[in-house]
Amino acid sequence: MALLTRPATETPAPPRPAAPARRRGRTGRWVRDHLVTFFGIAALVYLFIPIAVVVVFSFNAPEGSFNYTWNRFSLDAWANPCSVEGLCASLGLSIKIALLSTVAAVVLGTLAAFALVRHEFRGKALANVLIFVPMATPEVVAGSSLLVLFVGTGFPLGQTTIFIAHTVFCMSFVVVTVKARLVGLDPRLEQAAQDLYANRWQTFWRITFPLILPGVVAAALLSFSLSFDDFIITNFNSGSEVTFPMYVWGAAKKALPPQINVIGTAMLLIALAVTIAGRVVGDRRAAR
Amino acid sequence: MSVAGAPAGPALGRAAAPEAGPGGPASGARSGRLTPYFLLLPLGLALVVFFLLPLLSQLNSSLTSGGLEEGYRFDWAVGNYVEVWLDYWPQFLRSFLYAAAATVLALLIAYPLAYTIAFKVGDGWRPVLLVLIVAPFFTSFLIRTLAWTTVLADDGWVVAALRGSGVLFLTDGVGLTTDGRVLATPLAVILGLTYNFLPFMTLPLYASLEKQDRSLLQASGDLYASAWDGFWKITWPLSLPGVVSGTLLTFIPATGDYVNATFLGSMRESMAGNVIDALFLRVRDYNHAAALSISLMVAIVALVVHYVRRAGTEDLV
């Protein structure tokens, strides 16, 4: 808002002599620069407000069964994250499903990305649109549609249906991520390998795969976190299975132990560690 | 996401050219022509069986009458649609209003953030800030949303500060909050939606701002354009693709979301997703639930197509 009022005082400046007008322009620019940065910092603070709550309340010993108000400092939850019934089982299930659907989505998505970037063929535009549509479908619609199909065909809901649902919505994100990497890859590198009598298989594993690996890893990490964190689609297709988000959903109505915050904080730390490790490896590679 | 593909621009043209020429390996023209189809087959099959077929069976279910006991009969039961619209239009409308409000708010917050990172900080800080933007989203979506209930609690200092500064008096006046409270009001739901989908707005904006040619701004400055003119005539138009994809990536999931409405709102704030969830999983009235779900999908597609067309023509001007 303040941004909008600022230039109004500035516009009538031009008819004046050059020097003061320019100075005014400069102060205007200074104010604008710092206003934008100020808003940027405020946005970052806003991003971290609930995170701070999650971290702080993981050290809380709640008075009742809900962890909404501060009672007193305690390390109990960190010492026994699995002491709450069903929590770690749900965590294990989420990790298992996320790993399986990541592998499936990465394989299917990478193959498709190759087709879309390295080949010209009839129906390519249609394929591109079809792969984009799942990303543009709200999760309630995608999740409930799968439920209707599974119920209609009598397919029992459980881990298999969660796995299928997660693979399908992760695939499109893998295609987009790997495609971005492949597009930036010079096909002459592969041609050079083939000129040197490498067969297709050798070319792929020795040249292409190492070069697109960062894209594949990024896609896998994205896919893992999408699957791990998904609630809405899982809610429709889980039957009686309880993933971690499903556990939190149920706990929010009954009791919210600080152990949930411990796991939230741990996930944040692990993700940060993975990102930093990724950067270090990337930097080393770049340095070589 | 597209950040990874930033240096892709010039290589694209190069990649296409040798493919069209005789560059293909000597494994026979026929197998070469079929290769892309084989590569696409597994994903395509999964997409057809587990995405398109479900959508069709949902459409089928929405036009079916009957129930669990008396059995289902497909008879073009358009009445399902009329009934859900009559019963649930407030939730339906609310989904779009809240999502639109959250999208606008997210744009207002994300633009300065993306702009700061793209234009105002050094190369060393940029990756750090990008990680900081994404980092909060590694703690679970549900846990984050629940954390807002603590922040916005009635006796918390945030609400006290808002009340003290008179903000809640204003929002009470327009019906965004009631009785000087924030939790269980439309404002809380909109804030939650804004927060949860913020990175989907920030990252595309950053990608489009980051690749802009800085010399254009310098040139405008040399031609005595004010900083403000430079922004409105150069930076903003060039960032429109980012604005369009950011708003879509925020608006679409926000419309279908019901976690924020459940945790941060009350019955009065429930959205279409809440109804679809309840009809499917509690009432087990699949036909009406499917009718509502299909209606939501169609409405979103119609809005998105309209928006992309308008944004597209603006882009050309």
Image: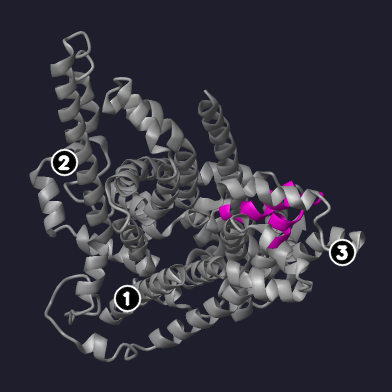
Q: Mark 1 falls within which chain?
A: A
Q: Please give left or right for residue B78 compared with residue B248 in the image.
A: right
Spatial CA distance of label 2 from label 1 is: 36 Å
For the view shown, which residue lies furthest in the front direction?
Answer: A196
Q: Mark 3 falls within which chain?
A: B
User: Above or below — where is B264 with respect to A85?
Assistant: above
Estimate the x, y position of residue B227 in percent, counting from the top left.
27, 28
Estimate the x, y position of residue A228 in percent, counting from the top left.
47, 73
The residue carrying mark 1 is A269
Are there few (<14), some (14-19), or many (20+) residues within 10 Å of tag 3?
few
Q: Please give left or right for residue B67 compared with residue B171 in the image.
A: right
Estimate the x, y position of residue A15 in percent, counting from the top left.
21, 8
Nearest to viewer (mark 2 / mark 1): 1
Are there few (<14), some (14-19), or many (20+) residues within 10 Å of tag 1?
some
Spatial CA distance of label 3 from label 1 is: 50 Å
Q: Which residues are magenta?
A: A114-135
Q: Are marks 3 and 2 on the same chain?
A: yes
Residue B295 in the magenta stretch? The answer is no
Give SS at disc 2. helix
The amino acid beneath tag 1 is Leu
The residue carrying mark 3 is B26
Q: Are marks 3 and 1 on the same chain?
A: no
x 34%, y 65%: residue: B135
